[in-house]
Amino acid sequence: MLVIDDVAPDWRRMRIHECSPVERGTSVRLRNECAAYVGTQLFPGIRPGCIRDGFRCEDLQQQTFGEGSFDLVITQDVMEHVFEPRLAYREIWRTLVPGGMHIHTTPIKKIAESVRRAARGDDGSVRHLLPAVYHASPIDRAGALVTFDWGHDLPRLIAELVPF
């Protein structure tokens, strides 16, 4: 919340999209204090745009939101689980108003270059390129598969994709 308060002190009046919120901390405060807050989860088998358990089902890589829908998009510890981050960053950019912000956290490994851990096959199956690693997930007890180990090159990679 310190970063959000610092860079977006009027966040309570903003249209905010938070991908994969949890039931604690920043997510709860945003949901309770921002009237235009939308929390989303990617629920397998649920049509994007539908509501389940109080969350809108959205695939960060192919969102159903219109262009310029949000002033602020927040992804906390999400981007290491996305199969096609280039699509996700472009979609986040598309859904932001001009001058909008994306605040995101993701683990950065002590490596110079990012490494893909898993990919999707042509048939949609998961192809493990390295041994599978899972992080806790707010919607799946099995956890969320880590698809990338992000390295120190992540800011450059993002800058090559979208003009944040």
Image (cartoon, rainbow, N blue to C red):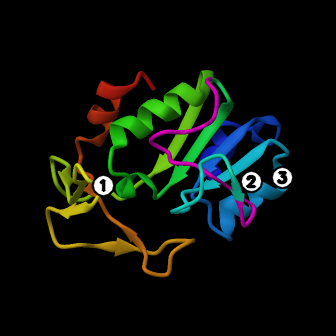
Q: Nearer the viewer, mark 1 or mark 2?
A: 1
Image quarter in which the N terminus is found: bottom right
Give the magenta range. Answer: 52-67
Q: In the rendered view, would you say 130 is above or below 37?
A: below
Q: Nearer the viewer, mark 3 or mark 1?
A: 1
Residue 108 point in image, percent of width and height: 30, 55
- What residue do we see at 40% from left, 55% from top? 106
Q: Amino acid at mark 1?
A: Gly
Q: How packed is label 2: few (under 14 Cα within 10 Å), some, or many (20 or more)?
A: many
Which residue lies under the disc numbered 1?
124
Q: Amino acid at mark 3?
A: Glu
Q: Tag 2's secondary structure?
A: helix
The disc at residue 162 is none
Q: In the rendered view, would you say 146 is above or below 132?
A: above
Q: Tag 3's secondary structure?
A: helix
Which residue lies under the disc numbered 3?
33
Reply yes or no: does residue 129 show up in magenta: no
The disc at residue 30 is 2
Residue in front for this viewpoint, 164 or 20:
20
Asked whether residue 1 appears in the rendered view, the answer is no
- What residue do we see at 15% from left, 46% from top? 113
- What residue do we see at 46% from left, 58% from top? 77
Q: Residue furthest front?
A: 123
Reply yes or no: does residue 62 show up in magenta: yes
Residue 157 point in image, percent of width and height: 27, 34
Left or right: 57, with 125 as reference point: right
Q: Amino acid at mark 2?
A: Leu
Residue in front for this viewpoint, 138 or 128:
128
Residue 42 point in image, percent of width and height: 54, 57
Residues at circles 2 and 3 in contact by the CB criterion of under 8 Å: yes
- What residue do we see at 65% from left, 44% from top? 17
